[in-house]
Amino acid sequence: MNRQLFQHDEFFGYRFIPGLKARVEHEGGGYLVRVNQAGFRCDHEVLPEKRPGRFRVLLFGDSYTAGDGVSNPHRYGDQLEKLLPGLEVYNFGLPGSGTDQQYLIYRQLAEGLEHDLVLIGVLVENIRRVVARFRPYQTSEGHPLILAKPYFSLGRDDELTLHHVPVPKEPLPVETLPPADRSHVDQGGRLPWLREFVNHVGPRAKDWAQRLTRYQPLPAYERSDDPAWRLMRGILRRWISETKTRVIVCPIPLYQHVEGTASPRAYQARFAELADPPRVVVHDPLPDLLRRSREERRNFRFGVDCHLTRTGHRALAESLVRSLLPMLEEARH
């Protein structure tokens, strides 16, 4: 996470610097970041009331939704506006955030806005972030530090309790973190030593290793009673219960699922538990993405960076139209 783009927020950890305009270097040639006065990468300023004739969507997610790697107009939320005239998307995506932080953004900033739909883009990897209490980052000199994040714990009867709010502002040196907390630092995935090795030898070797081993990156989805999934499900159910509009939950697959090196069945089964149509729709974009050729699917991500390219964002938007269009047409009538 490039801290020069963000400022501290006591409720959900951080947000973009309001009004920021910046060019970020990237393997894809660099991209432009434009931030509204609320502190999010959205070309719309946040207004309490809708404009006449607009179907307003409040969109939440992490860097895949905020659009790391691409300029604002090329993200799937912006592409939806082009595909569906009359749609207005307020993008509250926040890179590096978990579903817990995204729920807090909704509660603090968006709940009182007039809107027609809440769209939660859950990168399926977020199941690791909701159990994390700290996030690592490096200073410009390469020194590792730890930042606290807000988090929920799950008690008896699946009751959620919020911690770390107000969010501590000052970072901690890694070595000062109490031993009991070190297991709650988000390491970005399983087997970090192996991930570091395959990243070092290059993306082709990484792809080969994953195909050979059939590596399963997210085992927490394999059981409905897994503690991480119970926490994720509890956060999403509370979020859904507090909305007054329809909700689309969109599990965004990892590239391993899109490119066929890992099975999606476990996470698909878990997210299906949330469906309660017509008010709560779980939109799984993976079947639509898998209809594309292997070459097309490989081009949904960058060469090294696993974030979505313009092509990947467009494909995700085209899939979401399948669930959004009927709602938009219903609202018009």
Image (tube, grey):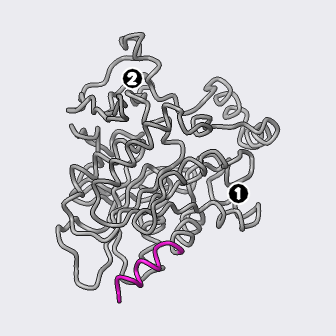
Q: Nearer the viewer, residue 96 or 233?
A: 233
**Circle 2 — which element?**
strand
Quickly name the residue at label 2: 145
At label 2, the amino acid type is: Leu
Say which residue appears at 38% left-offset and 49% top-offset. Answer: 237
Q: In which quarter of the image is residue 262?
A: top right
**Which of the image's four quarters has the C terminus?**
bottom left
In the rendered image, residue 326 lying in the magenta stretch gets the answer: yes
Q: Quadrant of residue 240?
A: bottom left
At label 1, the amino acid type is: Arg
In the rendered image, residue 66 lying in the magenta stretch gets the answer: no
Mark closer to the chain start, 2 or 1: 2
Say which residue appears at 42% left-offset and 10% top-offset. Answer: 179
Q: Which of 245 and 262 is in front in this view?
A: 245
Per the rendered image, the range of residues in magenta is 322-333
Q: Residues within 10 Å of mark 2 (few under 14, many from 20)?
A: some
Disc ID at residue 203? none
Q: In this view, does 168 lie above or below 236?
A: above
Say which residue appears at 71% left-offset and 42% top-offset. Answer: 203
Quickly name the residue at label 1: 298
Left or right, 95 with reference to 220:
left
Residue 161 place in picture, x, y as percent:
28, 32
Residue 307 place in picture, x, y as percent:
55, 51
